């Protein structure tokens, strides 16, 4: 199995950005945790991050040509604004799970809207970085 983990804007700032909300683990800690878990499960994984919407679309489209089996995506703030990311997910028809470190339903009103969730088979919110492991395990089943 081959899984692509995509992280959107500001996730490269984990451990620095609002640690009271996002925790003290860094982006490097997140990637190491994901890679270790996938190695234990025999899953091939690639982790990508960008602060640019078009890059995220390119990552999704590239997954199709790379014969990726599943996508874990945390689009960051683009969750609430990006029809382009939603359309890219629909275009490639690769199973996907949306992940958010914080509970977006308990935050500002605008964060309660997710364009991405209308495509994803599951949305995991508020479980910290461990939510990525839950998403990977769900997709591997």
Image (cartoon, helix red, strand yellow):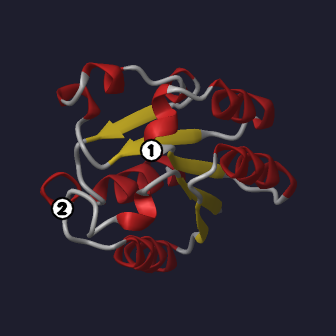
On the image, numbered disc 1 is attached to which residue?
A: 76
Residue at the extreme left of the image, as rendered: 20
Q: In which quarter of the image is residue 102?
A: top left
Along the line of sight, the residue nearer the viewer: 50 or 117: 50
Camera-side residue: 140 or 26? 26
* Label 2 to label 1: alpha-carbon separation: 16 Å
- Judge left or right: residue 76 versus residue 26: right
Quarter holding residue 45:
bottom right
Numbered disc 1: secondary structure: helix
User: Residue at the spot x=72%, y=45% of the render?
Assistant: 54
Q: Position of residue 26 (x, y in %)?
A: 32, 73
In the rendered structure, the answer to whether residue 68 lies left or right of residue 27 reads: right
Name the residue rendered at 82%, 60% in the picture. Answer: 66
Q: Where is residue 38 in the image (x, y as percent from the top left)?
A: 49, 72
On the image, the x and y values in percent for residue 108 come to 24, 26
Q: Quadrant of residue 76?
A: top left
Residues under numbered marks 2 and 1 in contact, where contact means CB atoms less than 8 Å apart: no
Query: Whole-percent x and y of residue 139?
Result: 52, 48
Mark 1 neighbour class, 10 Å CA radius: few under 14, some 14 to 19, many 20 or more: some
Left or right: 80 as drawn, with respect to 68: left
Residue at 50 percent of width and 79 percent of height: 39
Q: Along the polypeptide, which appears first: circle 2 or circle 1?
A: 2
Q: 41 or 113: which is nearer to us?
A: 113
Q: Which mark is residue 124?
A: none
Q: Relative to 84, is 73 on the left or the right?
A: left
Residue holding disc 2: 19
């Amino acid at each position: 199995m081959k899984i692509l983990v995509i992280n959107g804007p500001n996730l490269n700032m984990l451990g620095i950005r609002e640690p009271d909300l996002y925790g003290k683990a860094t982006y490097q800690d997140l990637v190491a945790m994901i890679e270790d878990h996938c190695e234990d499960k025999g899953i091939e994984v690639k982790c990508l991050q960008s602060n640019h919407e078009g890059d995220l679309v390119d990552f999704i489209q590239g997954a199709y040509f790379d014969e990726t089996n599943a996508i874990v995506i945390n689009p960051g703030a683009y969750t609430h604004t990006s029809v382009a990311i939603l359309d890219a997910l629909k275009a490639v028809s690769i199973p996907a799970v949306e992940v958010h470190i914080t509970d977006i339903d308990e935050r500002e009103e605008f964060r309660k809207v997710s364009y991405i969730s209308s495509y994803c088979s599951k949305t995991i919110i508020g479980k910290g970085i461990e939510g990525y492991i839950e998403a990977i395990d769900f997709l591997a089943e």
